[in-house]
Amino acid sequence: MKNLKYILIGLLSILFIFASCQTTLLNPNENDKDNNVVFSEFNNAEIFEGRILVGYKNKDSIEEIKKALNGVVYIEIPEIKVVGIKFNGTLKEAYDKLKSLKLDGIKYVEPSFKRDLIDPKPEIIDDTITKNIDGVSEDSLWGMNKINAIDAWTVATGTNVIVAVIDTPIDAQHPDLAGQFVTGYDPVSGNLIMPDEDYDAVLGGPGDKGDDHGTHVAGTIAAKKDGNGVVGLAYGAKIMSIPIFQPEYIGDAYVADGIIWAVDNGAQVLSNSWGGGGYSKTLKLAIDYALFHNAVFVAAAGNDHTDQHWHYPSSYPGVIAVAASNARDEVTDFSNRSDTISVAAPGEKVLSTIPRHSAQIYGVYSEPYDYWAGTSMATPHVSALAALLKQLHPNATPYQIKKMMENTADDIDITGWDHAAGYGRINAAAAVNETLPSTSGANYDFYVMSGDGAPLSNVFISLVRKSNSGSNYYVTTDDGWVGLYSVDPGEYTLILSGPDYMQFDSLNYRSEEATVLTKDITLSDESTEIYLVLKSTFKLDIALDSTITGGAALLVTDFYSDIVLEQDISEEATEFSADLSDLSGQFKLIIYRDVTKSASEITFSGIATINGNPVPVIGIIPENESKGFIEDARFVNYAPAGYIPWTIF
């Protein structure tokens, strides 16, 4: 029956109308219902065909999924209970097969999205710039001077801190980087990457500039301070290479595995200069895993100059999203704007390392260095500063590290926090002298359910700051749950909207049945579970074309079983009303008569007012029949009577 849902949506093009609802707190032990599997849609996002990612509570149905698709498990991530399955065919074909199955113990099925390196912007550098690339005293390393690196180094250099560069392979034998590595990990092959191994040459090679990206990022983080070449802000730190572009993006499941491996093997900071569209539950679970283990997750905001909050991983809660600034302390034209931006950092005309084999092709004066621009180049400045702070405060939470950067940033662009620069351009010297915040960050689990306790998937949760100063947070429930970790305590407007009726597994078939809750909420510096109930309103006003001899009754039946409400309709009535707002579930609405007393055809019509939104209804009790279904007038030409339930939350 659910397949009909998409036909109805396509034919009717129903507008999504938000309506009001109420909320109550529940005892968590009162609810133990399984929900349908969430099948995440991908709309226009680029995906890997022939792959699905499956989140599970237990693995009982994994074999059934493999059998249905004739697929194989290509990766398993037990830490977050996810498997990746490869098969021959398209994602749509896979969804069509799986949606007809009862998949016990499965939380979600989603695509593996394609994502991109945040491409560096080309830089043309005047030949008058000195050829002697030697330390931060040169104008060519303006970014280090701008963020007061020299003063910061009197306090910390990143000693004993491991920074995972989740990027392309890296030339570990570059003269500025040799000796700066710990063992890395290739999530695709499962191979360990030895500290002195030039994995860039293994997977890339001469002329492949895409592989230069990770080496450039690594140089900004931890290039040695030895009087030669360039120097990284955290030159005392060590780099862990996690190559996720080989040369193309390897997929969300492999990346999630790489994130978890890095955290489990000592990475305290994770630097991510990549991203794209597509909300991946798998990626979010991996990032949450990192945050739970006190690893700082830094991500580039992107180079599209758009103002949005759908760029991932930078838009996930708890992530430090980084914008790019220039030598004039302006946010660059290409840098994305967003209400998730935390800080800005130097991201224009950034000189750093590139692989030795690229020197003759791209290098400045044929040396293994190049000037690049982008939020990709800004991000490693912030990752390196996180390493300095982790050296000083090894037990600090990701939230505390982020707040020390934000509290000491130099305000640029619009005064105060803004969508372009966040709290401002980082100041390394000020940050390393900042006192550790007394608050450790808010960690919240939200459970959203209907009035009868059914967990609600596909509910959008937005937390918007009442102060309009600082990052907002956006997440989506699956199986009625979603977590927000390492976020700012404070006063927020909580907005719940949904369930999204366009999703296959949502209980509702109509946009009008989706609800919106708006309420004020205070997030405190603690770990808390919040249980919320979405409660909708539903009223009927029906007109009969004639009276019914002997009277009749409105029957409300559970869609799958019993009568839950019966309301008499008097013999004289030509119209009646009913308020069903106290109910919760999926229902059939029936007008029932005693056919021995009244056998002629009866037609009726009216309005169902759902969450304040009118929906036209019609129906007929055929001659010599005892009942007629109250139907959505928009569906009658596309579905048999009584086939589409009415949903009341």
Image (tube, grey):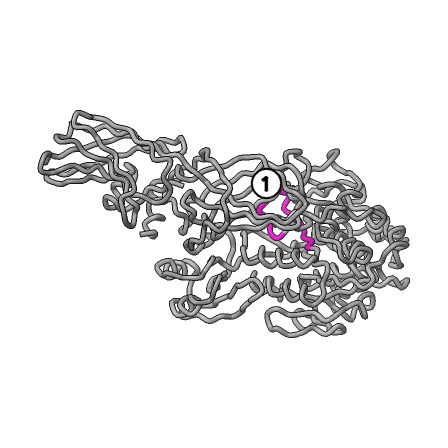
Query: Where does the magenta region start and end?
Result: 297-313
Q: Position of residue 231 (x, y in %)?
A: 84, 59
Q: Secondary structure at mark 1?
A: strand
- Along the line of sight, which residue is nearer the eye, 283 or 263? 263
* Residue 363 appears in the figure: no
Image quarter hosting the C terminus: top left
Q: Is residue 182 above or below residue 126?
A: below
Query: Going 21% across and 30% down the picture, which residue do you hit?
Result: 569
Mark 1 burial class by Cα count in 10 Å: few <14, some 14-19, many 20+? many
Secondary structure, magenta segment, majority class: loop
451 vs 586, left or right, is: right
User: Which image quadrant for residue 225?
Assistant: bottom right
- Along the line of sight, which residue is nearer the eye, 371 or 528? 528
* Residue 152 appears in the figure: yes
- Along the line of sight, which residue is nearer the eye, 541 or 596? 596
497 vs 288, left or right, is: left
334 vs 91, left or right, is: right
Q: Position of residue 400 (x, y in %)?
A: 74, 49
Residue highlighted by disc 1: 463
User: Which image quadrant for residue 114?
Assistant: bottom right
Residue type, numbered disc 1: Leu
